[in-house]
Image: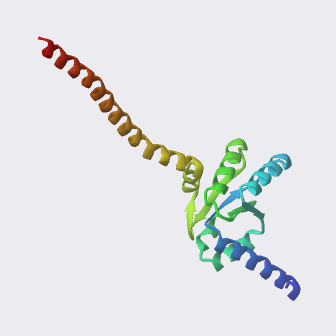
């Protein structure tokens, strides 16, 4: 049986992970088997830059942390060499970065994830990764708002231009009638 100090350390690790899970909008569980050190280093750097915490931990400890925050269904995916990527604020970030590496490395695999307190499957994580970035979505929204306004402005300008051309023609016709 493990000593009391080891149990306390494990409980602290579980509590810390549970706190991260509870405070994050989303996360992804991956099987990291077969990733090279070089690729792992690059992936971890990309995750850090995206504000994502990437943790490799014993499956039993990760499972306990998931139980504490109501993600008990996640335990079915915690087999083999797993790691969890936890988003700090951008729910799409871990899915985007990890999908990129899952496509490059054959043995690296996305297993599942969670989103707003609910466990989601691999397909949902992949769909989440395909969502455009916030900046792209804002640009599309602004473009769709701006487009009808430009159309209206061009239509009004065409009316003004047409009326502007019609006025001199009407004045010329009136001048001809006056001379006749």
Q: In percent of the image, x 69 and y 57: which residue is there?
A: 30
Q: In percent of the image, x 24 and y 19: which residue is there?
A: 169
- Res 106 seen here: yes
**Residue 112 sits in quarter:** bottom right
- Res 80 seen here: no
**Residue 56 sits in quarter:** bottom right
* Quadrant location, the N terminus: bottom right
- Residue 109 coordinates in the image, percent (x, y): 68, 52
Pick out the residue farthest to the bottom: 4
Q: Nearer the viewer, residue 154 or 167?
A: 167
Q: Nearer the viewer, residue 171 or 86?
A: 171
* Quadrant location, the C terminus: top left
Pick out the residue farthest to the front: 179
Q: Nearer the viewer, residue 138 or 77?
A: 138
Q: In percent of the image, x 32 and y 32: which residue is there?
A: 160
* Location of residue 70 with respect to 86 vertically, above or below: below
Question: In this image, 119 relative to 65: left or right?
Answer: left
């Amino acid at each position: 049986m493990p000593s009391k100090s080891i149990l306390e350390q494990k409980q602290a690790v579980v509590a810390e992970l549970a706190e991260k899970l509870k405070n994050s909008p989303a996360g992804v569980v991956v099987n990291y088997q077969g990733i090279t050190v070089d690729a792992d280093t690059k992936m971890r750097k990309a995750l850090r830059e995206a504000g994502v915490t990437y943790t490799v931990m014993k499956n039993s400890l990760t499972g306990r942390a998931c139980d504490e925050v109501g993600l008990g269904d996640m335990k079915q995916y915690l087999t083999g060499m797993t790691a969890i990527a936890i988003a700090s604020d951008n729910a799409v970030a871990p899915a985007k970065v990890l999908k990129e590496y899952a496509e490059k490395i054959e043995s690296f695999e996305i297993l599942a994830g969670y989103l707003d307190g609910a466990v989601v499957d691999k397909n949902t994580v992949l769909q989440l990764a395909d969502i455009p970035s916030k900046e792209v979505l804002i640009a599309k929204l602004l473009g769709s708002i701006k487009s009808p306004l430009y159309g209206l402005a061009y239509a009004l300008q065409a009316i003004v231009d047409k009326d502007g051309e019609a006025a001199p023609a009407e004045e010329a016709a009136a001048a001809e009638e006056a001379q006749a």
